[in-house]
Amino acid sequence: MSDYLKELRVVLGKRLLIVPGVRAIILRNEKEILLQHRKDMGMWGLPGGAIEPDETPLSALKREVKEETSIIIDEAKAMALYCGPSQRFTYPNGDRVQGHSVAFIVSKWSGRPLPDGGEGLALEFFTIEELPENIVPIHRKTIEDYLFHYHGEFLVID
């Protein structure tokens, strides 16, 4: 959690926060998607996180992906905006958020994927046919939108 969000939590406690964020569909060979096994929920999810003050969605994406995976993003394409009540989420510690997130497709990247050991315990590329069952629900929806609904036009999902 960023210092900014920690400061907000001190003031607002567990109350619902609307948090701008990013998530990355990182592809290898156009047939495999990188997922991280999340420490906080014990589920698989897309790399990403909150946009911090003075960041753009793209700069936040690059920072978050580098922090969580050690990957350097060479090129990313905005795919969709996810917003509204469908993006509500309660963390195991009781913190409630409603995301307002931009999902990006990352097909050009460099480096060797390494988990940070903090937020992510493991990183693994999964084929589209063999995705794990226990994926964070809002991230599963993002993957499904990429696979079945995205045709090059920016999507708005509410």
Image: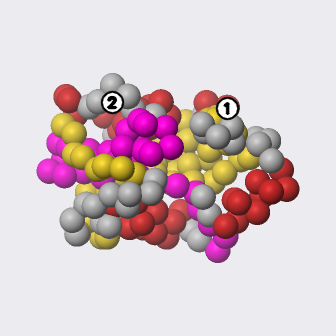
On screen, residue 51 above or below 151: below
Q: How crowded is mark 1: few (under 14 residues within 10 Å), some or many (20 or more)?
A: few
Rendering coords of residue 112 (x, y %): 21, 65
- The total number of labels drawn is 2
Rendering coords of residue 69 (x, y %): 34, 61
* Mark positioned earlier in the residue sequence (1 or 2): 1
Q: Mark 1 points at which residue?
A: 85
Identify the residue shown where x is 32% and y is 45%: 35
Q: Name the residue under label 2.
A: 148
- Of 128 and 89, the residue lying toward us: 89
Magenta segment range? 26-54
On screen, residue 78 above or below 131: below
Left or right of 13, for residue 5: left
Identify the residue shown where x is 18% and y is 37%: 127
Q: Does any portion of residue 70 appear in the rendered image?
A: yes
Q: Is residue 27 magenta?
A: yes
Determine whether the residue tagged by mark 2 lies in a helix, strand or loop. helix
Separation of marks 1 and 2 at Cα, in angstroms: 22 Å
Determine whether the residue tagged by mark 1 lies in a helix, strand or loop. helix
User: Three-letter amino acid code at disc 1?
Assistant: Pro
Rendering coords of residue 24 (x, y %): 40, 52
Please state, as top left, top right, bottom left or bottom right, where the C terminus lies in the image.
top right
